Image (cartoon, rainbow, N blue to C red):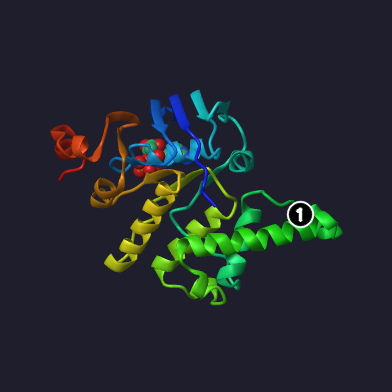
Amino acid sequence: EPLQGAHLRTAGVSKAFGGNQALAEVSIDAEPGQITAIIGPNGSGKTTLLNMISGFYRTDAGVISLDDAEIQGLPSYQVARAGVSRTFQTPNVPEKLTVFEAVEAGRYAAGRAGVLPSVLRLPSYWRERRADRHEAERALALVGLSEHRDEMADSLPLGNRRLLEVARSLVSSPKVLLLDEVASGLDEDELEVLEQLVRRLRDAGMTVILVEHNFQLVLRVADDIYVLAQGSVMAHGTSDEIESNPRVMEEYLGV
Ligand code: ADP
């Protein structure tokens, strides 16, 4: 089954916290079948942008759109339902669940399944449960964790916990996947597995947005890179363009 992407755009998005302008008129364009990376030093606004795209913060100004629909101002569960899913920097792997159960639970976390039908044991509840299982199997297979399905989720090594976190995001069949620092703390082998997964999702047609500190990883995988500095896009281009931009390399990344 091919994965479906959607065109995610921000246009002139701004956000201030008190007097602190965290983002100033940020416009990014993330296309299906591409990995769009957002990089920049600490405090440059990366997390704020993710939080606004996923509906955790409200924008002060600007438009966020998914294909032709405007999604700014929607609460996070509606953004998730519209097809935007995200991982978190700290994997929030639930305790005392197997890997499979944790992935199934991701569907509830994404707001796909209501609580009431389960309490009332309506037929729709059992239909949902079957759909959950099917989607969970598929998400586990996509990230390559099927053989670990019956292990306890919180016993997995960090690399696999990150893959599990991605599977929990994929279980709601999102069109746009926001990956928040998924590579941090991984060893070389784990990084390789994650990198291949991200490429596979891209090649299957998803819209992948990668917020990432690992500059080398970004240069290897990203089709399009936005560099944030003090809340604004200070550079935008391909890996080659970013790598040969002295301002980016010296002033903002210190490499
Ligand atoms: P990055 O993710 O690139 O490190 P952030 O988006 O976390 O940057 O931060 C951008 C700016 O916004 C920083 O000055 C930060 O202190 C501020 N900021 C982020 N979130 C909040 C918040 N919830 N309340 C107040 N200030 C915040």
Q: Quadrant of residue 33?
A: top left
Residue nearest the viewer, comparing 73 with 201: 201
- Residue at 62% of width from left, 53% of height from top? 109
Q: Quadrant of residue 232?
A: top left
- Give the mark count: 1
What element does badge 1 sit on? loop
Q: Quadrant of residue 235?
A: top left
> x and y percent of residue 166 in the render?
48, 57
> x and y percent of residue 45 in the render?
37, 37
- Residue at 53% of width from left, 46% of height from top? 85
Would residue 186 appear left or right of 50 to someone viewing this image?
left
Q: For disc 1, does the CB lie below 8 Å from ligand 1?
A: no
Q: Quadrant of the C terminus?
A: top left
Circle 1 residues within 10 Å: few <14, some 14–19, many ≥20:
few
> x and y percent of residue 184 in the render?
34, 58
Whether residue 72 is situated above or below residue 192 in the rendered picture: above
> x and y percent of residue 125 in the render?
79, 57
Q: Is residue 68 visible?
A: yes
Whether residue 250 is situated above or below residue 27 in the rendered picture: below
Residue nearest the viewer, comparing 55 with 124: 124
- Residue at 23% of width from left, 40% of height from top? 239
Ligand 1: quadrant of the figure? top left
Residue matched to label 1: 115
Q: What's the amino acid at mark 1?
A: Val
- Residue at 53% of width from left, 71% of height from top? 153
Residue nearest the viewer, comparing 229 with 187: 187
